[in-house]
Image (cartoon, grey):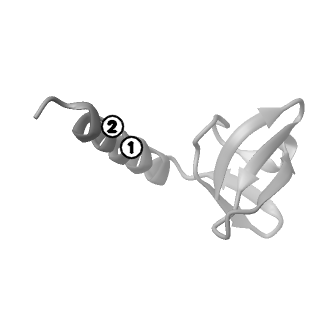
Amino acid sequence: MIIDRMEGNMAVVETAKGEHIDVPLTLIDGRVRDGAVLVEHGGRYAVDEQATGARTRNLAERRRRLFSKR
């Protein structure tokens, strides 16, 4: 699950199925931000910093390859 954006006291989260759900920020542990990867644990959520970092690096590399001069 990926945090798409924050709206007030809710995080709009995209699920693996491409659906969007609203998750109260009070149920999320960790550094909440757009693009952060979430894992669910018994009705609560946590930011997976390793997965978020890997995703950020992957997207940066894809952008670099897409926009680099050939």
Q: CA distance from mark 1 to mark 2?
A: 6 Å
Q: Quick check: marks 1 and 2 in contact, CB under 8 Å? A: yes
Front residue of 62/53: it is 62
The percent coordinates of residue 63 (x first, y second) are 33, 37
- Whether residue 1 sits left or right of residue 55 in the image: it is right
In the displayed structure, would residue 10 be above or below residue 47? above
Q: Amino acid at mark 2?
A: Arg
Which residue position holds label 2?
63
Marks 1, 2: nearer the viewer = 2
Q: Amino acid at mark 1?
A: Leu
Q: Quadrant of residue 31?
A: top right
Going 86% across and 42% down the picture, which residue do you hit? 26
Say what secondary structure mark 2 lies in: helix
Going 77% across and 34% down the picture, which residue do you hit? 6
Categorize mark 1 by other alpha carbons within 10 Å: few (<14), some (14-19), many (20+). few
- Whether residue 7 sits left or right of residue 50 in the image: it is right
In the displayed structure, would residue 7 be above or below residue 44? above
The percent coordinates of residue 25 (x first, y second) are 83, 41
Going 44% across and 51% down the picture, which residue do you hit? 50
Which residue position holds label 1?
59
The percent coordinates of residue 48 (x first, y second) are 55, 52
